[in-house]
Structure formats: C-alpha cells, structure tokens
Image: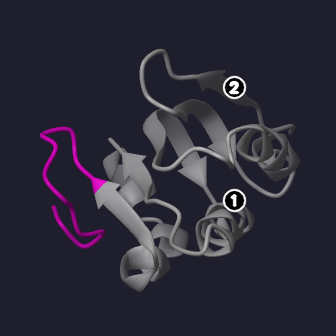
Amino acid sequence: MTSVLTIDRLGGDPGLALAGELDVSTAPQLIAELAAIASEDDVLLDLTDLTFIDSAGMHVIRAFARCRNGRGRVVLANPSHAVLRSPAVVAAEHEVIEIVARSGDSASPSAP
C-alpha cells in the first residue's frame, strides 16, 4: 500500500498545509517543500488534514527546525488527536517545535 501526502502552500502565512500520511515514503516530498520556504522566519505546518505521521516524517520536521539555528519558529498547527498522540510527535514535545491546537493555544502532545 502506497502512502499519499498532499502539500499545499498556505495563502497568507509562510508555511505548508499537509494532508494524508507523512511517513518514510512521503518524507522526501516534505523535504523538497521545506527547502523552498527555508528562508522564511516563522514556518507554520498546518496538520489539520494529516492523518498519520511516523518517526521518519517527524525526523524531517525536527531536522528542519534544528537547521534554522534560531531564525524563527516551526509551528505544528491543528494536529488531529491521532497525530498528536503519535510517539513521534510526543517525542518532539521538548524540541524547538511549537505545537498549537485549533484554539491557538499551545498544546501538549499528552493533552486530551
């Protein structure tokens, strides 16, 4: 079974909207798209329609955040409960990545 990931640029904010599954087979797509927006200060990754993320997908996001060397935040916005509870996302709780719930409040991956 092949995973499918759709990536669209956000209209007003520098960032990307991810839909589908982010895993080892789709991570290269995200690498290419992140490279195109690497010069932006803050980068928003809208995860509203992301249904799955594994450690390979989260590794891409973490590596991107680390290589920015303080040039701005990487924000994971609107993760679903399934994505939020993924071990890969839970491990990122103490990283240089901010996770924001739909309300705009910071969310902990262990939040209900």
Front one among 34 and 27: 34
Question: Is the magenta region chiefly helix, strand or loop?
Answer: loop
Q: Residue at x 27, y 52 (%)?
A: 100
Q: Is residue 58 left or right of residue 51?
A: right
Q: Residue at x 38, y 84 (%)?
A: 94
As helix, strand or loop, the secondary structure at mark 1 comes to helix
Task: Determine the secondary structure under disc 2.
Answer: strand
Question: Contact (CB < 8 A) between labels 2 and 1?
Answer: no
Identify which residue is drawn at 72% across, 45% down: 34
**Badge 1: residue crowd in 10 Å (few <14, some 14–19, many ≥20):** many
Asked whether residue 101 is drawn in magenta, I would say yes
Q: Amino acid at mark 1?
A: Gly
Q: Which residue is mark 1?
A: 57
Which region is colored magenta?
A: 100-112
Name the colour scheme.
one colour
Residue 30, image x and y in percent?
Answer: 75, 44
* Rendering coords of residue 98 (x, y %): 35, 63
Instruction: State how far apart marks 2 and 1 are (Cα).
Output: 13 Å
Mark number displayed over residue 6: 2
Work out whether mark 2 precedes mark 1 in sequence or the reverse, and give the earlier one. 2
Residue 10 lies left or right of residue 80; in this view the side is right
Q: Quadrant of the C terminus?
A: bottom left
The one nearer the camera, 14 or 32, is 14
Q: Amino acid at mark 2?
A: Thr
The picture places residue 92, in percent across and down from the top left corner, at: 47, 76
**Screen quadrant of the N terminus:** top right
Characterize the local packing of mark 2: few (<14), some (14-19) or many (20 or more) Cα atoms within 10 angstroms.
Answer: some
Residue 105 x/y as whole percent: 13, 52
